[in-house]
Amino acid sequence: MSGIYLWTPLTSKWTETHENELYQVACIEMQGHRAGMEDAHQAVLMGNKAYFAVFDGHCGSEVAEAVAPKIYELLSKLEYPYKDSDLLKACETASNEINKLKTDAGSTAVIVLVNYDEKSKQYMIDTLNIGDSRALLIQSTKFIDLTEDHKPDKEEARIKAAGGYVWANRLQGNLSVSRSFGDKYLQPFGLISVPDIKRSVAVKGDTLLLFCDGIVERMDNTAVCKFARLEKTALDTCKRLVHESFQAGSLDNMSVICVKLGDFSCRKSDIEFIPRVIEPTTFNGIGFEEANDKFMKRHELEATKYQLREAEHKLAVMSREFEAIKEDLEEAEEDLKEATEGYNKIADGIEKRLEAKAETKLRKRRLDRTMEKREFKRSKLE
């Protein structure tokens, strides 16, 4: 589906917002001029920990949609601090699973794992990058690139050593990235799914951005940061970036995640689908009814997909809440068990002390009686 464009862009938007005491998060997806939505994203808050990811699919959405839950499943099992070997192994395992799919589609991936350290009051950031989706850390006076695009011309030596070639900055004259999940037909020619790993430190007041290359098709990172600084909330930041990118002429799918780091007062999650208002028009001689019918069918398909994702999201939230309650209950049961064992030990100790005291009293009484008898006998002899 890559490379096929709509006469009129589909500007309906999928939005997500999540918030707890440490993170304010927003995500927006817009299909735009592309004939299909091939991106996927994830944003998960887990107390002090958080997980964010954007997957930019190409030649179809199959790989992006499949790798998103798989890589999260693998990475969420790891203990912090993360070892490079474990992060690389997770990506390798996910890649092997994706290669079992019957598709030549592929997907880039940018993944950010965040752990808030209570002692230092800092956010520890681990960034994994495969392809040309990007992550930025915006600070008070500067921004930091957390990723570097994997382009074929930058890795030409490795590609040639693997038996491939680069033409027009494309792997085998086809793919514009040198690393991705999927794209099985290019793996014999140097395509790999090995991530670059970068570690960073952030503080409250900083902003994290993750986005697909559709956001920077007509802008650079400096412009992205300039527009991001104009907005106060994570949701308004996402809306601004999608709007500015679209107005600048981006023809690609657009996905962006904004994470505000700081002190927030509530815990909430929300999902909304904002449909585009369709107005009568004609497209290069094509009648409105025919074009609008195709557009509406495509819109209905996207809306159904989004409704399904909303239901899946709510189920996931309920599942996480259930797991949290289950963990609290298990901890409470463990605390009760420890308290009961402690009480039993104290009770046993008291019981033993009482028994010992009673035994001592009994022995004293026996001794007193024995002494009385001896005194009585002695007095009679006298």
Image (cartoon, rainbow, N blue to C red):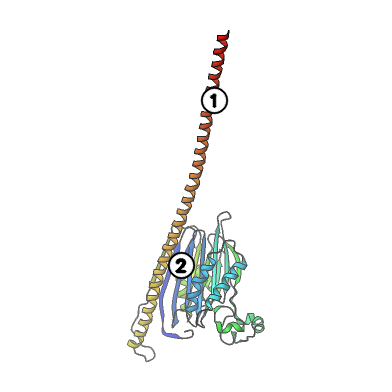
- Percent across and percent down for residue 256 are 48, 72
Contact between marks 2 and 1 (CB within 8 A): the answer is: no
In terms of depth relative to the viewer, which is nearer, 355 or 61? 355
For discs 2 and 1, the disc positioned in front in the rendered view? 1
User: What kind of residue is marked 1?
Assistant: Arg
Q: Secondary structure at mark 1?
A: helix
Q: At 44% from the left edge and 81% from the top edge, which residue is drawn?
A: 36
Question: How far is disc 2 from disc 1 in space, using C-alphas?
Answer: 79 Å
- Percent across and percent down for residue 379 are 56, 10
Q: Would residue 34 be found to the left or right of residue 278 on screen?
A: right
Residue tagged by mark 2?
A: 26
Q: At 50% from the left edge and 35% from the top edge, which residue is drawn?
A: 351
User: What kind of residue is marked 2?
Assistant: Ala
Instruction: Classify mark 1: residues with Cα within 10 Å, few (<14), some (14-19) or many (20+).
Output: few
Looking at the rendered structure, the number of numbered marks drawn on it comes to 2
The quarter of the picture where the C terminus appears is: top right
Using the rendered view, name the quadrant where residue 305 is placed. Answer: bottom left
Residue tagged by mark 1?
A: 363
In the displayed structure, 175 sits above or below 145; it is: below
- Percent across and percent down for residue 85 are 62, 68
In terms of depth relative to the viewer, which is nearer, 150 or 223? 150
Instruction: Classify mark 2: residues with Cα within 10 Å, few (<14), some (14-19) or many (20+).
Output: many
Which tag, 2 or 1, sits closer to the chain's start?
2
> Which label number is shown at residue 307?
none
Residue lying at the far front in this picture: please name it: 381
